[in-house]
Amino acid sequence: MRQKRITLKDIARETGVHVSTVSRALDPVERKSITEEVASRIQAAADALGYRPNRIAAGLRTNRTMTVGVMIPDITNVIFPPILRGIESVLEPLGYASIIVNTDSERDRETRLVDVLRDRGVDGIIHAAVLRSDPSIARAAAEGLPVVTLNRKVENSQIPYIINDEDAGICEMLRHLRDLGHRDIAHVAGPQDLSTGQLRLAAFRNAAATLSLDFDPALVATARRFDEKEGARCIRELLASGRRFTAALCANDRLALGAIDELREHGIDCPREISVTGFNDMPFLELIRPRLTTVRILQHSAGQTAATVLLKLMNGDKAEDIPMETILPVEIVVRESTARVRQDDEDRPA
Amino acid sequence: MRQKRITLKDIARETGVHVSTVSRALDPVERKSITEEVASRIQAAADALGYRPNRIAAGLRTNRTMTVGVMIPDITNVIFPPILRGIESVLEPLGYASIIVNTDSERDRETRLVDVLRDRGVDGIIHAAVLRSDPSIARAAAEGLPVVTLNRKVENSQIPYIINDEDAGICEMLRHLRDLGHRDIAHVAGPQDLSTGQLRLAAFRNAAATLSLDFDPALVATARRFDEKEGARCIRELLASGRRFTAALCANDRLALGAIDELREHGIDCPREISVTGFNDMPFLELIRPRLTTVRILQHSAGQTAATVLLKLMNGDKAEDIPMETILPVEIVVRESTARVRQDDEDRPA
DNA sequence: CTCATCTTCGCAATCGATTGCACAGAAAGG
DNA sequence: CCTTTCTGTGCAATCGATTGCGAAGATGAG
């Protein structure tokens, strides 16, 4: 049979004091307003009975559930689990638990899930979904719910955001390719309805300008999803266009892996004939040949940072203590999928 | 400013009825005990005001939170996210949310997290952790909390469990190797304090007997963790032992991948000289050469099944309607890492 | 037309913890 | 020794929804 829980009332009966006294004695901050002797007697009784506070009841009264909501597109996407561990690493020791929901990047799901989280009384939300617009989360934030976004910013809002320095990552990567002698560099862009896809394309364009490289719209192929199949399709498209290119900078690792596979199908060797780069540095990359040159993102610290900012928000810290924008550094990791452009390619006039 | 929530009381005031009437009108099952006209008036008011029930308050009264706890070793392990999606796919449509915790396979963490979940009043727990013993979860179940375990059973308990037919998987794989002419087959075993590691070693031994193959303890190397590095180390160990083997059946994919890499380091080709097999069929395997022959586990359906059984438990279904044991089928997927044993090897007398 | 039966709804208790306020007794000050 | 100020504890309301019970009012049977 289901054991009935020990409540404050039980302890009160046991120790002969009022439940409010018990409540105070067990609260670390209120405890000092209670005679030490009484407090420790209560503490002892609580321990003896195996008292465990009922967070539901406390939550009803205090309106704090010590729970946060985390919204991500899809947990099976390998970049998210490390983020979640990062979040957990700062929140869990403080007694917070998190409810994780997958939006599958569908707008109506996203809207519904925001409500689901609010109904459950979460104290705050970390929003790592990637749709480029979503009124529901903005509304929630406007109504006072602590919210931070990860990997993207919500326009026209006061929502703090944490992003990776993707601009710098793309730029460094492009510089790396340029330094290897590449001039005709294609971009396999991600879906343009996802913030990551759009941001990285913009970054690519900017980086080209910064490095005084030509930006040729014909050398941009846009994927419909972030997967290998689309990476392959984009490369086919680029190849079919007849435009010459010696390198392809892809908007993420999976696109790059698909691209390399497809090149191989066409008898084109990476990196000897065409260099390919990825983005994210997902796990297991070391095991796939050629080992992919990519941009490493600090997923774990991104999660930690998001959690830290959310905490400040939930604590009601002063606005000036809350960083509205956090840009995390990225680094390029050079492996085997990029190589110096071939002499005959390099010599041939553009 | 934080908007104050609409409560039943607000609707009651608005419609001129008692809050209990409102409560009933909004409850799909109680609704029929209310005049249709009143009910729809209340419904309209609720919609107009944008009423959202406070699950915390309901939870306090009913002692049901519509929340389940899910315990896994580590979310960054690629086999767990599909399980979680499977769980979600059955629970979420019914209004349940899940709190996911990572145990890191540490006993004290596991114990503590069970309490964390209970304090939050979860209605049930799906326990996919892998330690071979853990009194805390058994105690929770004994006290009446609905619990099901995934991937392992808890001895001496009435806890329903869902497992994959690993015995069959190992046996089929061994048969596959035997059919390819292999006779000297090594086993790279997983950690023996984890149920998966232990189960698969036992399965290997049984399968050898079933197939009348020799089981040579000297051809078993035991990994301390389920990762590539340990797979490599085990292969080194086997190679160093001087015992001859033409195939290595590994307890999971990562061990297998490490093994193949290490063989390559030693100038040994897989599959030409030594065949290697994995277990789990994790994502991205298709991208790694040689493509690994492995055992596919239905992670998603395992999650679904666990959730379904947990639901029955939480609904208080009759004991005979609750399957205590569910064994999910597995299938071997033959790719490139296994090949027929070489003639000279085959001919050479054992 | 009366009494029994049903429907429909209101009343109030309840879940367990928190917290503003009141009050009693002790310590302090004059 | 009496007032004033603390200090420690009790009292009771509160958070919002649920639900057993009872009381009107409606309906029906006789």
Image (cartoon, coloured by chain):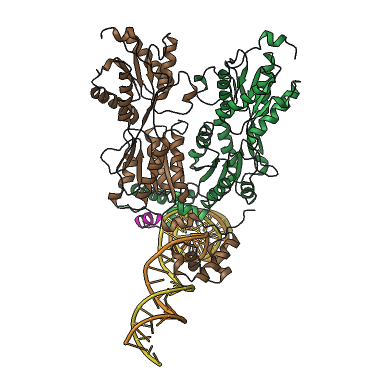
Chain colours: A brown, B green, C orange, D yellow
In the rendered image, is residue A194 in sight?
no
**Among the 4 quarters of the image, the one containing residue A163:** top left
Residue A245 or B210: which is nearer the viewer?
A245
Q: Which residue sits at x=32%, y=9%?
A: A345
Q: Is residue B274 above or below residue B322?
A: above
Taking B144 as reference, is B292 above or below it?
Answer: above
Q: Say above or below: B39 vs A74.
A: below
- Residue positioned 40% across, 15% down in the render: A271
Instruction: Please identify the quarter of the rendering in which residue A44 is found.
Output: bottom right
Which of these two is toward me, C22 or B214?
B214
User: Any magenta on residue B10?
Assistant: yes
- Is residue A70 shown left or right of residue B86? left
Instruction: Tell me where residue D13 appears, x and y as whole percent.
Output: 41, 67
Relative vertical location of residue A120 with respect to residue A275 in this rendering, above or below: below
Q: Which residue is at the front of the view, D11 or B244?
A: B244
Q: Magenta region, mostly helix, strand or loop?
A: helix
User: Is residue A304 highlighted in magenta?
Assistant: no
Q: Is residue B344 left or right of residue A167?
A: right
Numbered marks: total: 0
The spot of residue A87 in percent (x, y) is 43, 42
Q: In the figure, residue B131 lies in which quadrant?
A: top right
Question: Is residue A44 visible in this depiction of the protein?
Answer: yes
- Quarter of the image containing the C terminus of chain B? top right
Give the image location of residue B331, x and y in percent: 62, 23
Q: Nearer the viewer, residue A54 or A187?
A: A187
- Residue stretch in magenta: B6-18
Left/right placement of residue A233 relative to residue B92 reads left
Q: Give percent across and percent down for residue B191.
A: 63, 34
